[in-house]
Amino acid sequence: MNRRTLLPVLILLGLVAGAMFGQWFLFDSATGEGVAAEHWTKVAGDITLIRPLKLMIIPIVLVSVVVGVTSIGDPAKLGIVGGSTVLYYVVTMLIAVTIGTTLVSIVQPGEIDDADRAQLTQEAPEHYTESDVASTIERAQQEKATNLPRAFLQVLRQMIPENLFGEMAGGRTLGVIFFALLLGLALAAGGEATAPAIRVFEALFDAIMRLVQWIIWLTPIGVFFLVAWTVGRIGFANLVGPLSKYIAVVLCGLAIHGLIVLPIVLLLFTRRNPFRFMFQMRRALMTAFGTDSSSATLPVTIECAKTEGGCSKRAANFVLPLGSTLNMDGTALYEAVAVVFLFQLYGIDLEFGQLLVVVITATLAAIGAAGIPSAGLVMMVIVINAVNTSLFGTGKELPLEAIGVIIGVDRIVDMCRTTVNVWGDAVGAKIITRIAPDPPEEYAPPAA
Ligand code: ASP
């Protein structure tokens, strides 16, 4: 078995073995109690996989965007690539959110029997206050980051930062991408004078990719621990309780988007077999599933897209870093389903106008969500606040603690939506490869 076949097999084994270990050895089925949030399996997963991958994020974003931009060179061409990329992000996210809203309105997972409903809503505030997500939400509320215009201002501020090193130190990629874009443009415009610096960036990029290829071998161990922790915390039994319909709607929506819509889009634009491409991207997709983070997966996504996936350097280096923070089809779909579900559960019927508010704000919330675990759960507050505002005067309002209903099962849902987020980025890179293919290798005359 060669290395390309061996690694995905090992990652898959890690996923399955982790799930079994978590269910049999960590989760206590008799009492229904899961392991603590800071269990050793979580710490082990963090150290063996998440931290090494995170270490690569900022260098890879800076260097890959510079290399992507300098290889496109011409600002007009860059404009076309940038415009098409953003258009792709927005359209696919809107499709995802529409699928989610339609499914949740038809299936109505919030219409459950009264005893279950009473129990879920009664326990929600306690789950909410106990979770670490609550403190993040509270902080965001205090900074008014959960009000839509303020949240957008914050994204804009992050995009145009004052201090590059501050953004790097804080692990915020948007500002780094912005700087890398400008630097790449300046280097491309500099001609002979800046050509050596471009070669330095290209060499650095090769070196970082080499590092990533080494780190990727940690993936099977890392996903084993992380999945063991997730299953050990929640247990499979909880997936068949009163929330099963909600989980099924999210997973069904994600499947429709990831297995039908995105493949059709890919087929239309590239005329290539989408499932072959999905297979080629399998290491990145499994890493996304195991780590729960599109940002942490980014190094693997870039590596996979270029080595096996056949994406051009120009497209992958540009579309993937931007996509890992802005393009989140899975999160957008999930936001819509989760919010409408919670309103249904609390007996508040949403009309067409309010569903439209959900569609728009869920898309914006997904754009604003960071590529880290549970980011979607925090950004959901924006959608809930917006719908509550649109209900003003009706005397109806969804309490924020309602989020406590879904906090317990969120990790598993998050693993699936993160996989779709990364798949959406990969499809984008493949499509943009058509617009921005790499030039054929320059002909080097044989040495005399
Ligand atoms: N975990 C997701 C990601 O990294 C974001 C989310 O919570 O939806 O893509």
Image (tube, helix red, strand yellow):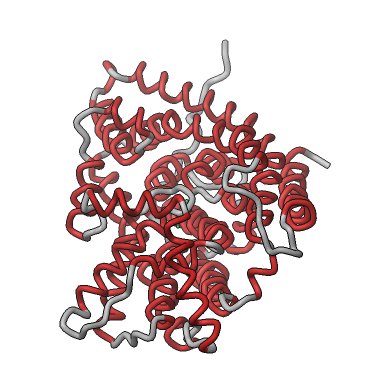
Q: Quadrant of residue 360?
A: bottom left
Q: Quadrant of residue 100?
A: bottom left
The quarter in which the N terminus is drawn is top right
Rendered location of residue 199, percent (x, y): 41, 20
Front residue of 297/213: it is 297
Could you tell me which residue is drawn at 70 percent across and 50 percent down? 228
Rendered location of residue 241, percent (x, y): 63, 76
Residue 12 seen in render:
no
Horizontal side of 57 relative to 189 (left or right) equals right
Residue 66 seen in render:
yes
Image vertical order of residue 114 relative to residue 220, above or below: below
Q: Quadrant of residue 50?
A: top right
Rendered location of residue 118, percent (x, y): 49, 81
User: What is the number of callouts on the image?
Assistant: 0
Front residue of 440/154: it is 154
The quarter in which the C terminus is drawn is top right
Image vertical order of residue 351 relative to residue 295, above or below: below
Q: Residue furthest top?
A: 448
Horizontal side of 13 relative to 348 (left or right) equals right
Q: Residue furthest right?
A: 1
Rendered location of residue 382, percent (x, y): 29, 63
Image vertical order of residue 94 relative to residue 371, above or below: below
Image vertical order of residue 106 relative to residue 436, above or below: below
